[in-house]
Image: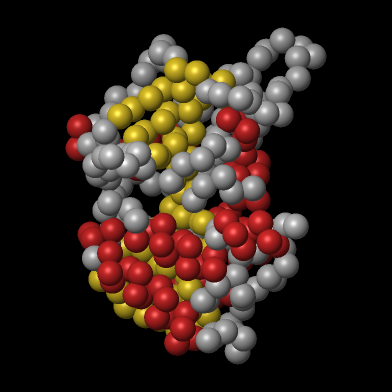
Amino acid sequence: MSAPRVLVFGDDSSPAADVAWLFINTHCWPGWRLEVVTAHVPDVPGVALPHEITELHRWKPPQPRAVFAEARFAEVADLTAEADPRIALSRESDLLVIGPRGPGLLKALHLGSTADWLLLHPPAPLLIARHGHAVRTVVVCADGSPHADKVADVLAGMPWIDSLAATVLVIDDGRIDVDAAIDGARRRLEAAGATVEVRVERGAPTATIHAHLVEASPDLVALGTRGLTGLRHLRLGSTASAVARTATCSVLVACDEQEYARSND
């Protein structure tokens, strides 16, 4: 029997985390394991946070979050550690879900900085939830790069993929194979059950994606952390960073692990 897929939720009890929790529970995750991770930061002056943790421990939160029956998780575990929240959340999983902003993933760090750090050092596909309703429409940014293919694979692996209407958005800057980019994303999404349409635009990637998101108002935008468009050699492509910061919808980002490792050698 194969191990269950794992969704990690970073909980700091903030309003942003409440939204992310609602996002999780308005989707169905049959057979998945949910890990609710809370990082406790010591209030003792002069006590430094550990940079690494060996394990998270099960605990009983004072006010446990209620899991909706409709979410259909196979298992739910409340886990904690006395650690930097960025490190606590850097664990292997199939999906990491956080809110966009809060008092600091438990009082030490601004969640913006935590989200930025996780984008730069992706331990798993990262979903920044900005609303609490189910995803019905998604824009998938495709350029034929390994990172763009990875995010299409991640999205195709979501158990609620067959309810999605997806738009594959390709920015033709003259440096990519447009047909290959379209085919790669469309093939993955259609095989998983999504309905797919294609949009090809010209222009600067960040501005063009932003304009499309304003026009289309999707529930989710999905893109690779780096690609062949934009500034390829930045650790987090400026396009992905800008979209993650400014999109009003939820954002899913992912990177190809092998390509990421090669580019950071």
Residue found 58% across the figure and 38% down from its top: 90
Q: Position of residue 217 (x, y in %)?
A: 38, 64
Where on the picture, by quarter, is residue 58? top left
Asked whether residue 71 appears in the rendered view, the answer is no
Q: Position of residue 83 (x, y in %)?
A: 63, 23
**How many marks overall?**
0
Q: How is the image coloured?
A: secondary structure
Residue at the far right: name it: 46
Instruction: Using the image, determine if residue 90 lies above or below residue 213.
Output: above
Residue at the far bottom: name it: 174
Instruction: Using the image, determine if residue 93 lies above or below residue 181.
Output: above
> Quick check: 85 left or right of 149?
right
Asked whether residue 255 appears in the rendered view, the answer is yes
Residue found 53% across the figure and 86% down from its top: 177
Quadrant where the N terminus is found in the figure:
top left
Q: Position of residue 20 (x, y in %)?
A: 41, 39
Quadrant where the C terminus is found in the figure:
bottom right
> Quick check: 45 left or right of 208?
right
Of 70 and 219, nearer the camera is: 70
Residue at the far left: name it: 70
Q: Position of residue 144 (x, y in %)?
A: 51, 76
Residue found 53% across the figure and 23% down from its top: 56
Residue found 61% across the figure and 19% down from its top: 82
